[in-house]
Image: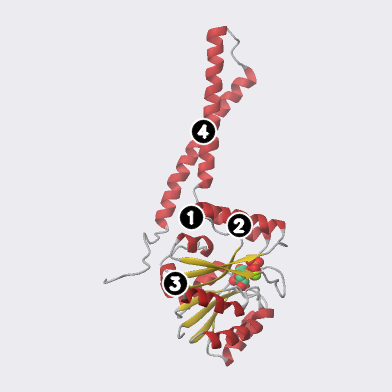
Amino acid sequence: MAESVSVVVPVYNNAATLKELADRLGEVLSHSAGSYEVVFVNDGSRDASGEVLRELSRNNQSIKVLTLSRNFGQHPAICAGFEHATGDLIVLMDADLQDLPEHIPLFMEELRKGESDIVYCTKNRDDKRLSSRFTSALYHLVFSKLIGTDVPLNIGTFRMFNRTFLEALLQFREVNILYGPLMFYMGFRSSFIDLPYTERESGGSSYTFSKRLKLAVNSLISYTDVPHKISIAVGSALLVGSILYSLIVVVEYILFGAALPGGNTLILLGLFLTLGSIMMFLGVIGSYVFRVYQEVLSRPRYLVREKINL
Ligand code: UDP
Ligand code: MG
């Protein structure tokens, strides 16, 4: 029962909810954790979040604040928080009170069973906007494909994990870090708890459709080889199609004395032949570039969960 807990919260324009969040976290954690700290990462907020955090940290040593020099985005902000978290158990949650502090003991209980290193949550919501439903479906499709296992569609950012997992996570030094796909990629023992979906209390999402789409495209490009496979597939289909067509035309000419195509048909045929081969080889080049990219990431080759007699 004596674990220390670090809560990492990225903050971008959440002035309205920060005080209540900090109070409720304090209330919950002072009962359920041995000791705790809340690491707020102010990701270049344009509202009063900075002042609110300064005020909160003045009266409470457990509240730590990292202020980034500008808005870097949710994931870089989370990274900063993780690098400064000192607890045995780490919680990641949003600042807008859509993740309830009161749920932290549920994650803890699950972790304490000792059967998992990370506990995720699933949240069911049915009133989601079509656009965000599309982007999140796309996003999940990407990493389900990547990991080769079924990642639940309604998974939330709210999660809790142990120090072993955190240390493995910190070994990933890539600049364009995306924690959603990465944490699944890392493996370890995971479990899920189901939480009710809570409406946001104030303001809207800090994500616009385009920001979210960018995120999805980003993970599609950096985590999968889908884009250049499309190029190879379309290119070779064009190439094979036009070669087949040419063959048919020539065979018809030789066997049945049919007229050879001329004019536009010939030009189009030549065009498809060249386009097809160019697209296909661009895709091939793409797959080499993808490999180079993977090497540049210089990811750890393996991650250790446990060592015995070592
Ligand atoms: N966030 C951030 N930087 C950004 C955008 C968002 O740190 O550029 C934080 C935000 O403060 C919140 C979390 O990321 O704690 C999730 O954002 P939000 O609640 O707006 O997203 P949604 O709930 O719609 O997924
Ligand atoms: Mg939110």
Q: Earlier in the sequence, mark 1 or mark 2?
A: 1
Distance from Cα at disc 1 to Cα at disc 3: 19 Å
For this orientation, the residue located farthest to the front is 113
**Residue, x 44% and y 48% (percent of image)?**
289
Q: Position of residue 122 (x, y in %)?
A: 59, 66
Q: Position of residue 249 (x, y in %)?
A: 56, 16
Distance from Cα at disc 4 to Cα at disc 3: 44 Å
Asked which secondary structure carries label 1, the reply is: helix
Residue toward you, 103 or 183:
103
Q: Earlier in the sequence, mark 1 or mark 3?
A: 1
**Do the residues under discs 2 and 4 have CB atoms within 8 angstroms?**
no
Write down the residue under mark 4: 236
Q: Is residue 217 above or below residue 173?
A: above
Write down the residue under mark 1: 147
Asked which secondary structure carries label 3, the reply is: helix
**Dot 4 amino acid type:** Ser
**Do the residues under discs 1 and 3 have CB atoms within 8 angstroms?**
no
Residue toward you, 80 or 126:
126
Whether residue 188 sits left or right of residue 41 in the image: it is left
For this orientation, the residue located farthest to the bottom is 59
**Do the residues under discs 1 and 2 have CB atoms within 8 angstroms?**
no
Mark 1 CB within 8 Å of ligand 1:
no
Write down the residue under mark 3: 166
**Residue, x 45% and y 62% (percent of image)?**
174
Few, some or many residues within 10 Å of mark 3 (<14, 14–19, 20+):
many
Asked which secondary structure carries label 4, the reply is: helix
